[in-house]
Image (cartoon, rainbow, N blue to C red):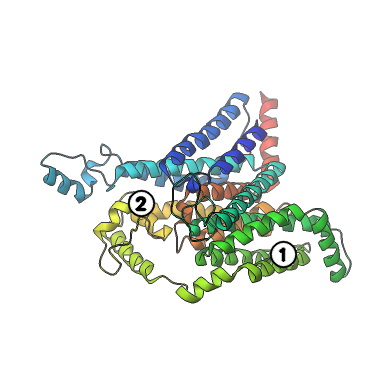
């Protein structure tokens, strides 16, 4: 059953980017039914067979509680019957303008709030399913390989679209992308995050593959490097090829934030490896050198577009800085209640001023943390962010402390650095395909961050209980 669910999960992750990165209502609806259904099937299977969860809820209890609190508050914000006395003043103004009573809510757009809440449930279900399925090392490795292959396939498709269709996306009627690589995503910055995630996963798999080849080598480092190059051609060439596709597509996107965030995540690889090597002498440093050489070579040959954008436009966007200041002002106008989860597009015009052009459309804050605080308020927004931060902390601890099979935790830690840093300047994590893929990576990473002794203890307890019965 678990293998079948893992295949279904991988198939869902392969579907997620197809319809403009999942950034439309129809794919939201499909995802909102498919992934929670997989979770319910899994829970029903455990209930019917009397089996325990591979990862007990207590292992991530604080994160679950914080996430649940944020989820409940998002529902309250969009429900007029639950908190009518706390309704936003815009609803009283609406009643006066229409001359009739209008049910008020905390959210300025309860419809978008409920849709965003459904998406939050979908993301949570992917994490929970990946957490449980990813406890098995083989399935965890299989899911990571599937994610790397999926991203590589979409990267190859994006390169083809850029080369032969001017960046346009056939069958979906969106404007041309100006020859930037964006695959099936509307926004090239969003695709850059997606390609970066695939590259990070590929790097982890590559290091793991070469690390196994070098584990028993004790020769001088030059000979070890030669053996690693041989192992690359023999065992890891498929992984390396997929990574090169993701790298070329990432650089071809021309996204400054996406490339810089991916670079920060990549820098974390040798840092975590060095921290690990101080604990046990098995870090494949030659593999890291080889991987670094490949990435630098790729940037040298394909990085012109990114360098050109930074040279012409700089790193910071002054318009975004102006938007950030307006969002901060709106946060402190409603610091506790918030303006409604997912309601930025309706809340922002109330605070918009002339510091940005009237012809520009801002339906996202381009800063996920500020938008979360604006929507949920400081308390529950921090709860939502904190729930994920605790899980990321587990991955960093697992990447350094695990005695074996640290690759999933290492990948999840570096992927988190990519996603969280890019969220400072963009909204990529708010796109379904990226959020779902990252949730799967994070779930696998947290699952493999746990010591196998917890699983052994659970099995021992279960056997003892069975004997007593």
Name the quarter where the C terminus is drawn.
top right
Residue 377 shows in this picture: no
Instruction: Give the quadrant of the N terminus.
Output: top right
Q: Is residue 309 above or below residue 393?
A: below
Under circle 1, the secondary element is: helix
Q: Is residue 301 visible?
A: yes
State the residue lying farthest toward the front. Answer: 164
Element marked by disc 2: helix
**Position above or below: 351 against 80:** below
- In the image, what residue occupies the spot 72% across and 42% down? 138
Q: Name the disc covering residue 214, or none.
A: none
The 10 Å Cα crowd at callout 2, few under 14, some 14 to 19, many 20 or more, is: many
* Residue 243: x %, y % from top left: 67, 57
Residue 275 appears in which quarter of the rendering? Answer: bottom right
Query: Which one is closest to the eye, mark 1 or mark 2?
Result: 1
The answer to whether residue 397 is left or right of residue 79 is right
| Residue 267 x %, y % | 63, 67
Q: Which residue is mark 1?
A: 291
Q: Which mark is residue 376?
A: 2
* Mark 1 in CB contact with mark 2 (< 8 angstroms): no
What residue occupies the far right of the structure in this picture?
A: 219
Sequence-wise, which precedes: disc 1 or disc 2?
1
Q: Which of these two is toward me, 217 or 160?
A: 160
- Residue 354, x across and y down, in percent: 25, 68
Q: Position of residue 374 (x, y in %)?
A: 34, 56
Q: Quadrant of residue 241?
A: bottom right
């Amino acid at each position: 059953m678990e293998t079948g669910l893992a295949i279904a999960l991988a198939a869902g992750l392969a579907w997620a980017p197809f319809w403009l990165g999942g950034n439309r209502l129809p794919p939201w609806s499909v995802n909102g039914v498919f992934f929670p259904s997989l979770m319910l099937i899994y829970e029903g299977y455990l209930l019917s067979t009397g089996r325990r969860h591979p990862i007990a809820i207590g292992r991530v209890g604080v994160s679950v509680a914080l996430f649940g609190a944020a989820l409940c508050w998002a529902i309250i914000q969009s429900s007029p019957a639950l908190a009518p006395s706390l309704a936003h003043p815009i609803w009283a103004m609406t009643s006066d303008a229409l001359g009739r009573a209008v049910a008020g809510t905390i959210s300025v757009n309860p419809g978008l709030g409920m849709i965003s809440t459904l998406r939050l449930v979908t993301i949570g279900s992917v994490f929970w399913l990946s957490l449980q399925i990813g406890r098995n090392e083989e399935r965890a490795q299989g899911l990571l390989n599937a994610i790397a292959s999926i991203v590589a396939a979409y990267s190859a498709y994006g390169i083809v679209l850029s080369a032969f269709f001017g960046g346009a996306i056939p069958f979906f009627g969106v404007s041309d992308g100006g020859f930037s690589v964006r695959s099936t995503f509307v926004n090239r910055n969003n695709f850059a995050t997606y390609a970066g995630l695939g590259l990070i996963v590929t790097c982890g798999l590559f290091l793991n593959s070469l690390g196994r080849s070098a584990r028993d080598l004790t020769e001088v480092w030059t000979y070890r490097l030669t053996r690693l190059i041989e192992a690359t051609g023999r065992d890891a060439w498929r992984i390396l090829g997929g990574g090169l596709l993701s790298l070329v597509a990432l650089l071809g996107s021309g996204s400054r934030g996406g490339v810089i965030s991916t670079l920060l995540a990549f820098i974390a690889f040798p840092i975590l490896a060095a921290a690990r090597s101080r604990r046990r002498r098995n870090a494949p440093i030659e593999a890291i050198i080889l991987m670094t050489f490949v990435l630098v070579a790729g940037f040298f040959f394909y990085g012109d577009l990114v360098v050109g954008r930074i040279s012409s436009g700089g790193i910071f966007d002054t318009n975004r800085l102006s938007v950030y200041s307006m969002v901060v002002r709106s946060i402190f106008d409603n610091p506790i209640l918030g303006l409604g989860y997912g309601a930025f597009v309706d809340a922002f015009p109330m605070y918009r001023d002339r510091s940005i052009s009237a012809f520009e459309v801002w339906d996202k804050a381009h800063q996920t943390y500020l938008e979360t605080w604006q929507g949920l308020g400081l308390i529950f927004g921090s709860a939502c962010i904190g729930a994920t931060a605790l899980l990321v902390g587990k991955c960093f601890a697992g990447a350094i402390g695990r005695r074996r099979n640290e690759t999933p935790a290492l990948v999840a830690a570096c992927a988190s650095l990519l996603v969280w840093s890019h969220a400072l300047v963009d909204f990529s994590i708010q796109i379904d395909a990226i959020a779902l893929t990252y949730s799967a990576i994070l779930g696998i990473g947290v699952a493999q961050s746990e010591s196998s002794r917890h699983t052994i203890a659970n099995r021992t307890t279960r056997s003892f209980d069975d004997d007593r019965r």
